[in-house]
């Protein structure tokens, strides 16, 4: 194993560790906080988190073994199962992010009727659709025997070893990425750009009211005026940064792998194996970044994390005090007897 392979293996190990811990923490927050569970986005987050954990404990270790051993890491049946999961979980992850963007679009564009438009039942129906959509392509690939170990990516995924099926497999792969990656990207762009437009409109209204107030307050201190103007600027930038993060992480993680797959099928030029594995690692890194992008940096999840941490620390404190005992109470026991 050369230095490139060692670096890719280290990247996979780091991704697995961060993904496992962060997604497990999101699950703990969901179990701990009833307020989070009552909201419709909790179903999308739960679906995304469970898929990320499954990818972390099944697909990533097999890819790591493939990178280290430079060959198929398991038997044909297990590899086909892992390839089925890889295709299903990747599609489910993309569609879950699209569902979260639709939820935020409804919340921003229709704030007064959000609870009526996005109930838990509606969210469950959307999750059920993502599962059916995500199952369609791996089921078809399994029936056509297009699941197995792909040496370029050192992982069990979509692949075809028969040259006479190259055209059919290329059409299938193109349709798969169009109805998973491209569809989700279009939904993300349409919904979040609409959210940004509405957010900027509201910011502009707030800015107008603020400026009118500042004009009326003639005797206001210049530092207060500057702070108000700085807050206006930060408010406008905050919405842009959030939406850029949502769309940017989606592209950075998934686009290299999708483009590599399409170039591999449409061009006769060889693709370096290290780039193939790296693009796969980037796709896996989405499982590690999702908890921070969609959950753990939000106020409710941070509050839940603090409550969980306080509960653990209090239990340890009580346990340690119970083991050591209170000297005062120990001295009192013989007297009471």
Image (cartoon, helix red, strand yellow):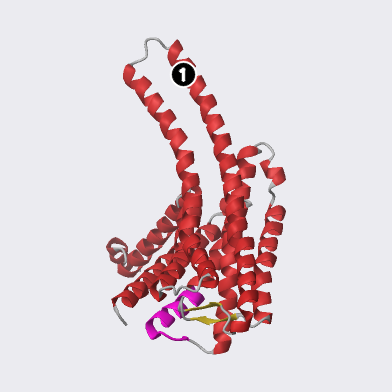
Whether residue 248 appears in magenta in the rendering, the answer is no
Residue 2 in view of the camera: yes
Label 1, secondary structure: give it.
helix
Front-most of 45 and 242?
242
- Residue at the image point whose x is 65% and y is 75% from the top: 168
Residue 164 picture location, percent across and down? 63, 83
Quarter occupied by the N terminus? bottom left
State which region is magenta.
Answer: 57-73
Q: Nearer the viewer, residue 321 or 41?
A: 41
The quadrant of the rendering that contains the C terminus is: bottom left
Query: Which residue is drawn at the image coordinates 63% and 75% (left, top)?
Result: 167
Q: Give me the residue at 63% from left, 38% from top.
A: 109
**Viewer can see residue 47:** no
Quick one: 31 or 169, which is closer to the camera? 169
Name above or below for residue 210 compared with residue 158. Answer: above
Residue found 52% across the figure and 65% down from its top: 258
The quarter of the picture where residue 90 lies is: bottom right
Q: Main secondary structure of the magenta part?
A: helix
Rendering coords of residue 315 (x, y %): 40, 62
Task: Decide whether residue 66 is among the magenta residues.
Answer: yes
The image shows residue 188 at horizontal and vertical percentages of: 58, 50
Left or right relative to 109: residue 16: left
- Which residue is under mark 1? 211
Residue furthest bottom in the image: 75
The answer to whether 204 appears left or right of 330 in the picture is: right
| Mark 1, other Cα within 10 Å: few <14 / some 14–19 / many ≥20 | some
Image spot of residue 176 (x, y percent): 63, 67
């Amino acid at each position: 194993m050369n230095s490139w392979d060692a670096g890719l293996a280290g990247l996979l190990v780091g991704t697995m560790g961060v993904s496992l811990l962060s997604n497990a923490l999101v699950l703990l927050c969901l179990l701990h906080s009833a307020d989070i569970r009552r909201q419709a986005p909790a179903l999308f987050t739960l679906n995304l988190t469970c898929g990320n954990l499954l990818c972390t404990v099944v697909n990533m270790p097999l890819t790591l073994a493939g990178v280290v051993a430079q060959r198929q890491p398991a038997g044909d049946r297990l590899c086909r199962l892992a390839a089925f999961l890889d295709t299903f979980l990747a599609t489910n992850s993309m569609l879950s992010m699209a569902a979260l963007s639709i939820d935020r679009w409804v919340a921003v564009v229709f704030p007064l009727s959000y609870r009526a438009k996005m109930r838990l039942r509606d969210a469950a129906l959307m999750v059920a659709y993502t599962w059916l959509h995500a199952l369609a392509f791996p089921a078809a690939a399994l029936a056509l025997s297009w699941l197995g170990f792909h040496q370029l990516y050192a992982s069990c995924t979509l692949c075809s070893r028969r040259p006479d099926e190259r055209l059919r497999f290329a059409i299938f792969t193109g349709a798969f990425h169009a109805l998973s990656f491209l569809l989700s990207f279009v939904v993300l762009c349409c919904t979040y750009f609409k959210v940004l437009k509405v957010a900027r409109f509201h910011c502009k209204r707030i800015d107008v009211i603020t400026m009118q107030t500042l004009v009326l307050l003639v005797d206001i201190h210049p530092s207060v005026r500057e702070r108000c103007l700085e807050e206006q600027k930060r408010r406008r930038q905050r919405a842009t940064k959030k939406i850029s993060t949502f769309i940017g992480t989606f592209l950075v993680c998934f686009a290299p792998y999708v483009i590599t797959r399409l170039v591999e099928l449409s061009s006769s030029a060889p693709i370096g194996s290290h780039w193939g594995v790296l693009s796969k690692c980037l796709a896996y890194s989405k499982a590690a970044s999702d908890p921070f992008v969609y959950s753990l940096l939000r106020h409710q999840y941070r509050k839940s994390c603090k409550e969980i941490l306080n509960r653990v620390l209090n239990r340890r404190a009580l346990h340690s005090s119970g083991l050591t005992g209170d000297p005062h109470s120990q001295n009192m026991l013989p007297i009471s007897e």
